[in-house]
Image (cartoon, rainbow, N blue to C red):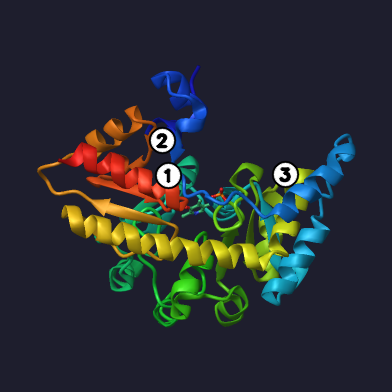
Amino acid sequence: MRFRKELEKIRIYEAGKPIELIARDYSVAENEIIKVASNENPFGTSPKVKAKIAELIGKMHRYPDDGCYALKTALAEKYSVGGGNIVIGSGSDQIFEFISHALLERGDVVLQNKITFAMYAIYSAQIGAVTITTDTNRHDLRAFEKLLAKNPRLIYICTPSNPYGDALNKEEVFAFLDKVSAQTLVVIDGAYMEYAAFKDPKKRIEPKELIDRFPNTIYAGTFSKAYGLGGMRVGYGIAQEDIIEALHKIRAPFNITTLSLAAASEALSDGEFVAKSAEHNFREMARYESFAREIGLEYEPSYANFITLLFPQSRSASEAANALLKRGMIARDLKSYDLNALRVTIGLESENDRFFKLFREYWR
Ligand SMILES: *Cc1c(COP(=O)(O)O)cnc(C)c1O
């Protein structure tokens, strides 16, 4: 079969390996496997969510509320915006997909960081748009600024940045946005914003302030990270109404399930769970930093729920990832990002202890 020429350049996204697969491939019991590969919340999700899901079990024959009324109302209240400023996606991934389809045409230029979320470039390539990148691992807005001359139609800024962990100050982002054409849409991907804002309030970007000052921006958030709902697939975009309306033209009806909508609304009401998760995250992060210093590995100071360990040329991060995998520890090799590095999600205290032990055994 012949497919669109654009697809030839796309490599299928390699998702984090699920526990069940590793158990099968390496004959390790599922409950002995530790996954620190996909930036999931090690505490699971708020207990309030489980109770809510149980209530809805009898309603699965009904289509979900396509207007996502309850969730939009809860998000609108949290962020002080209107319901018309919000679109819900099956993960914030789907928001990026909507944006690509609503905005881009073949040959359009999309600007992003050198090291950044892999899906941006895939959605752009699906349309035949051309991705250009900065040449720095960290987000450096001066490097972005230099590339504005290429007339990007769309710009992705990921703060905190996955898989590197660095984050921008709100003020520097706003100063950059002042220089961007009003015809260019800028995506602020705040998938890890709950963590960054906890560690350093200067990193917090409030969607309302963002879109009021810069009507050519959209803020993307997700329930997959701090809220612990990766399996439910819920994300959102917040922007001015003209942008949201365009995205709704792309969205298929009923793209979010009844259970996912309820889980997300309920999760939003448990701020304590998120605060506890963030507090634990940075307490344990400090142990990873000491560990890295102790064994002599460089790392990127992180504002998210993972730490990126940078390997010296003499040692291979891919080899380390494989060695850990054989012992039931799933971490993320960053080879596909051209980095000799391992991204490790901050786990429970006991999981982190196990990581330190296994890594030490491997390293010496
Ligand atoms: C995890 C992640 C997302 C969102 O993932 P979904 O599960 O699709 O909501 C978005 N951006 C970045 C940078 C991420 O790491």
- The answer to whether 204 is drawn above or below residue 45 in the figure is below
Q: Amino acid at mark 2?
A: Ile
Q: Name the element at disc 1.
A: loop
Residue under the image location 18 percent in, 52 percent down: 295
Q: Provide the secondary structure element on which disc 3 rests.
A: loop
Q: Is residue 242 above or below residue 334?
A: below
Mark nearer the N terminus (2 vs 1): 2
Q: Which mark is residue 10?
A: 2
- Taking the image as drawn, is residue 182 in sight? yes
The x and y percentages for residue 238 are 64, 66
Above or below, 180 relative to 261:
below
Question: What residue sits right under mark 3 in the picture?
Answer: 255
Q: Label 3 neighbourhood size at 10 Å, few (<14), some (14-19), many (20+)?
A: some
Whether disc 2's CB lies below 8 Å from ligand 1 is answered no
On the image, the x and y values in percent for residue 344 come to 37, 48
Pointer 1 residue Cβ closer than 8 Å to ligand 1:
no
Kindly identify the residue that appears in the image at 73 percent across and 47 percent down.
260
From the viewer's perspective, tell me whether residue 275 is left or right of residue 118.
Answer: right
